[in-house]
Amino acid sequence: MSRRGGAARISSRTVVARAVGRAALASAGASRPAALAATGGAVPQRVRALLSPPPPRRTLPFVAGALLLILCCASLANAASDSESLVESAERAQCAVDAGAQGAARVSDSQ
């Protein structure tokens, strides 16, 4: 499950924090005293994180990604347009060369 998965599904960070704390205390059993299980380790850190205000949403990476995608698409469209005009110019030049060659052949045939 993701970091914010349980709290997002339940929509109450307090309820999830209590459930995590109770599960940690229950799983500690006789191996550790309850005071140590409640004061040290990853579980209390997680409970504190759940009880604190949720972190702000980070929109900058999404906005930057969207702008980069738009820039790439615009560059691709520009490159496609330039390629098309380059091909058309080459075709016109080839037609001019072919027409010149045919005209030169007619002149040499008539002499």
Image (cartoon, rainbow, N blue to C red):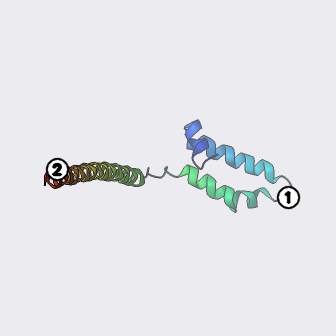
Residue lying farthest right?
30
Q: Quadrant of the image for the C terminus?
A: bottom left
Please name whichever residue, 95 or 7, is drawn nearer the observer in this view of the structure.
Answer: 95
**Residue 24 percent location from the top left of the image:** 74, 51
Query: Crowding near pointer 1: few (<14 within 10 Å), some, many (20+)?
Result: few
Residue 106's disc number: 2
Q: Which is more foreground, mark 2 or mark 1?
A: 2
Q: Residue at x 28, y 48 (%)?
A: 84
Residue 31's disc number: 1
Q: Is residue 85 left or right of residue 58?
A: left
Q: Quadrant of the image for the N terminus?
A: top right
Q: Amino acid at mark 1?
A: Ser
Looking at the rendered structure, the secondary structure element under dot 1 is: loop
**Residue 22 percent location from the top left of the image:** 72, 46
Please name whichever residue, 23 or 76, is drawn nearer the observer in this view of the structure.
Answer: 76
Q: Is residue 36 above or below residue 70?
A: below
CA separation in Å, label 2 and label 1: 105 Å
**Residue 25 percent location from the top left of the image:** 76, 51
Residue 70's disc number: none
**Residue 79 percent location from the top left of the image:** 30, 53
Please name whichever residue, 84 or 3, is drawn nearer the observer in this view of the structure.
Answer: 84
